[in-house]
Structures are given as C-alpha cells and as structure tokens.
Amino acid sequence: QLQLVESGGGLVQPGGSLRLSCAASGFTLDDRTIGWFRQAPGKEREGVSCTTRSGRTINYADSVKGRFTISRDNAKGTAILQMNSLKPDDTAVYYCAAGRHGWCTQGELKPVEYWGQGIQVTVSS
C-alpha cells in the first residue's frame, strides 16, 4: 500500500514547539519533492513549506517564516517539520505530501502525487 504517514502532532501551549515527522510506505521519498500543508477549520488547505529532492530549494509560507523549519533525511526516507513559537492561528490538520515531478513555490508543493492522512495540531492555553 502506497501511503504517507505523519506523526508528532498534539496539543501545545502558545509559544511552544512540536516536531512533525513524515514517513513513506510502499515507495521512497528520496526521489520526490516534499511539502507540508495545513487546513484550519473553515479554511482552505494551504501550503506551509516545501523542499526539493536535493534539499537545495526550500521555501515557506509567509505566515510561518522564521518559526518553522523543514528538513529531510533521504537515507531514512523521512521528512520533518519543526514548528517553534507556535500560535493559536497555527491550529490545523497538517498534511505531508510528496511529488516525483513536483516543484516548490511560496511554500507549496505542486503537483502532489501522494498525500498523508493528516494529523491534528492544536495550539491553545
């Protein structure tokens, strides 16, 4: 079964940190561009961050610049989204995505070949 699986979400207080991980099952991530998206209640899904296969191109949505860091470990086949200085506005379901022929633009991966199932991140006191 071809799928992406996220982990590491949960509840955190404002100003806190969370580390999301993404792993692939049935295929490899090392030859794919990777992106993180999020969708808050009542809002459209938005791109948060994106990194190309080599990791040389990385970009972020303006709303998370300076707070979130995307990374990848091609040897382990995983992707990480380190989220610091979290705000209540960061509350959303976060999705990992991958695309063999994808590119990164303003923090968004296009086009997406595979989606994860999503994981909840809640920032609240």
Image (cartoon, grey):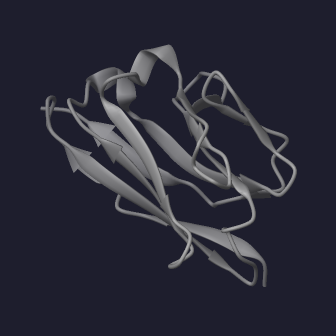
> On the picture, is 40 further left or further right than 11?
right
Residue ID at (64%, 68%): 4
| Closer to the camera in the image, 19 or 38 | 19
> On the picture, is 14 further left or further right than 46?
left
Residue ID at (53%, 21%): 61
User: Looking at the figure, which quarter contains the C terminus?
Assistant: top left
| Closer to the camera in the image, 76 or 91 | 76
> On the picture, is 53 further left or further right than 74?
right
| Closer to the camera in the image, 97 or 91 | 97
| Residue 99 at x, y percent in the picture | 79, 54
Q: Is residue 38 above or below residue 28?
A: above
Residue ID at (59%, 43%): 56
Q: Quadrant location of residue 37?
A: top right
User: Looking at the figure, which quarter contains the N terminus?
Assistant: bottom right
Q: Is residue 44 above or below residue 102?
A: above
| Residue 117 at x, y percent in the picture | 63, 60
Q: Is residue 22 above or below residue 69?
A: below
| Closer to the camera in the image, 96 or 45 | 96
Residue ID at (58%, 23%): 42
Q: Quadrant location of residue 47?
A: top right
Q: Is residue 69 above or below residue 106?
A: below
